[in-house]
Image: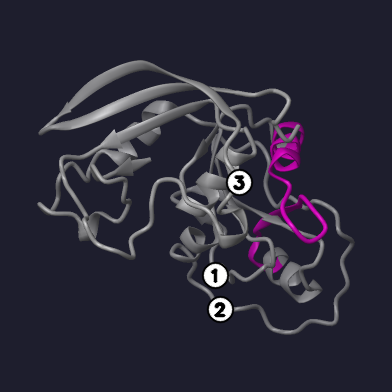
Amino acid sequence: MHSSLDGRTHPSRWRPKGAGTDWFEKIHDELGGDAWVIGRVTGSEFAKGKPYPASEAIFPRENWFAQRGAKTYGIVLDAEGKIGWGRSDIGGDPIVVVLTESVPDSHLAGLRGEGVSYIFAGTSEIDLALTLDILARELGVKRLLVEGGGIANGAFLRAGLIDEFNLILSPAIDGAKGAPFVFDSTEADSDRRAPITAMTLESTRELGGGVLLLRYLIKNDPQAVSR
């Protein structure tokens, strides 16, 4: 993730402007994940389509893949099936949507029609540990880059599924209400803490212009981890 000194993640709000904002994609490529994952709100920013129209088709609640064998996948958490994509990839990485079984068949028809892969990881709420199991088993994903927003990042953190944290820290400050944080939660999870037992600073790297790359290794309590 890339943040200001006060942990905010919308560079357009930072002051001074443009402080090290060109580093995210460079570090993303350097880390070399098999896939990257974002939440619904961030995913909506990449969507080009509208909600899918009604359909009489009925589909089994089974994982469906339009493409396998890609070098990198873009994973999007969309539990209720709200995003109409209008595209099948983001930056050349095929989209794989993580759904729950509660989504309507019309949404599945729309995803299939656009060549967007999807998996089911829960009945009404997404099970993140199950999501990782499916991605590893079906698509060979071993290294997943968790890249926001704050709600999605926080959910992975509280599930004990993050073992490494790479933070690009810019010499800028947001300093006002309303911007998302690197890690956040819904109201329902506001009192739930991550099962972290230790964090070790593995490396500190100066990227130039006062920008730092901090790499931490995270140790989670194995008894508290989802799976």
- Sequence order check, earlier mark of 3 and 1: 1
Q: Residue at x 63, y 27 (%)?
A: 142
Q: In the rendering, which numbered label is found on residue 197?
A: none
Q: Which residues are magenta?
A: 113-138
Q: Nearer the viewer, residue 138 or 207?
A: 207
Q: Which residue is mark 1?
A: 86
Q: Is residue 213 above or below residue 151?
A: above
Rendered location of residue 155, percent (x, y): 59, 46
Q: Position of residue 132 (x, y in %)?
A: 69, 37
- 3D distance between C-alphas at marks 1 and 2: 7 Å
Which mark is nearer the camera, 2 or 3? 3
Give the residue type at disc 1.
Gly
Name the foreground residue: 101 vs 53.
Answer: 101
Badge 1: how crowded within 10 Å, few (<14), some, or many (20+)? Answer: some
- For the residues labelled 2 and 3, the Cα–Cα distance comes to 35 Å
**Is 30 a magenta residue?**
no
Q: Kindly identify which residue carries mark 3.
A: 192
**Numbered disc 2: secondary structure:** loop
Residue found at x 38% / y 57%:
180
Badge 1 element: loop
Quarter-wise, where is residue 163 in the image?
A: top right
**What is the crowding at mark 3: few (fewer than 14 residues within 10 Å), some, or many (at least 20)?**
few
Q: Earlier in the sequence, mark 1 or mark 2?
A: 2
- Which residue is denoted by mark 2 in the rendering? 50
Q: CA distance from mark 3 to mark 1?
A: 36 Å
User: Is 224 located above or below residue 125 in the figure?
Assistant: above
